[in-house]
Amino acid sequence: SQKIEQNSEALNIQEGKTATLTCNYTNYSPAYLQWYRQDPGRGPVFLLLIRENEKEKRKERLKVTFDTTLKQSLFHITASQPADSATYLCAFYSGNTPLVFGKGTRLSVIA
Amino acid sequence: DADVTQTPRNRITKTGKRIMLECSQTKGHDRMYWYRQDPGLGLRLIYYSFDVKDINKGEISDGYSVSRQAQAKFSLSLESAIPNQTALYFCATSDPQMGRTGELFFGEGSRLTVL
């Protein structure tokens, strides 16, 4: 079955640096990937969607890439701030079932 | 007011008790979902419903049941709660007009502890 993996459970980064989070999947390439942000004790909030025919998508300081050869999506936060500290989840549809989520990467931006 | 509202937000119960978690939404979406979140395991799908007459099992439906009372309401029941059902439960909705690309809108979560 299709699996989705977020390699790092936790990532610490200095304020102002670029944070890069990785999402890998097995088997077939999904038509698209979604990225969500989750703050402690809160529900996830949608950030970005990227389709398989899109190499890159940007929204303000966020950038997502999709490499179907590597079976990987990278999520970048440029000029990171302490307020960016949260858990980031990637997700996609697996076959006809609703969104399958990775376990998430907890990002801490240190001032 | 939140678009997706879950009640209760926190609940402590004992093994063997019947528990219902309720979800209501004002977004007018047909599609509703129940996920469970555990540390280290991420979000896992329990049940989902694409319209009032449609109910589907997700990855981890054993020990759970659901009821779709109306377009806006989707309830999750634990008929006989057990300690390993202690988790954070999320209800979510999505817009069918967006199809498979539609983002999910989550509630604030219901934290359940089974002693």
Image: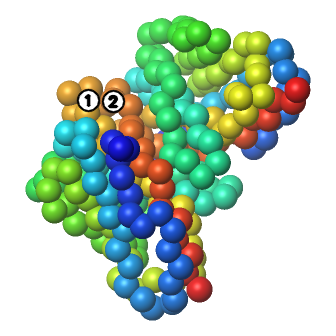
**Residue A8 seen:** no
Question: In screen coordinates, is B18 left or right of A90?
Answer: left
Q: Give the residue pinned by disc 2.
A: B102
| Residue at (33, 29) in percent of width and height | B102
What residue sits 26% from the left and 29% below the top?
Answer: B99
Q: Amino acid at mark 2?
A: Gly
Amino acid type, callout 1: Gly
In this rendering, the answer to whether B64 lies above or below B22 is below
Q: Quadrant of residue A30?
A: top left
Residue at point 59%, 40% (across, down):
A38
Pointers 2 and 1 in contact (C-beta within 8 Å): yes
Q: In the figure, is residue A18 to the left or right of B83?
A: right
The percent position of residue A111, horizontal first and vertical second, equals 88, 26
Quadrant housing residue B22: bottom left
Q: Nearer the viewer, residue B85 or B26?
A: B26
- Residue at horizontal 84 percent and vertical 21 percent from the top: A15
Residue of label 1: B99
Q: Residues within 10 Å of mark 1 (few under 14, many from 20)?
A: few
> Helix, strand, or loop for circle 1?
helix
Residue furthest to the front: B1
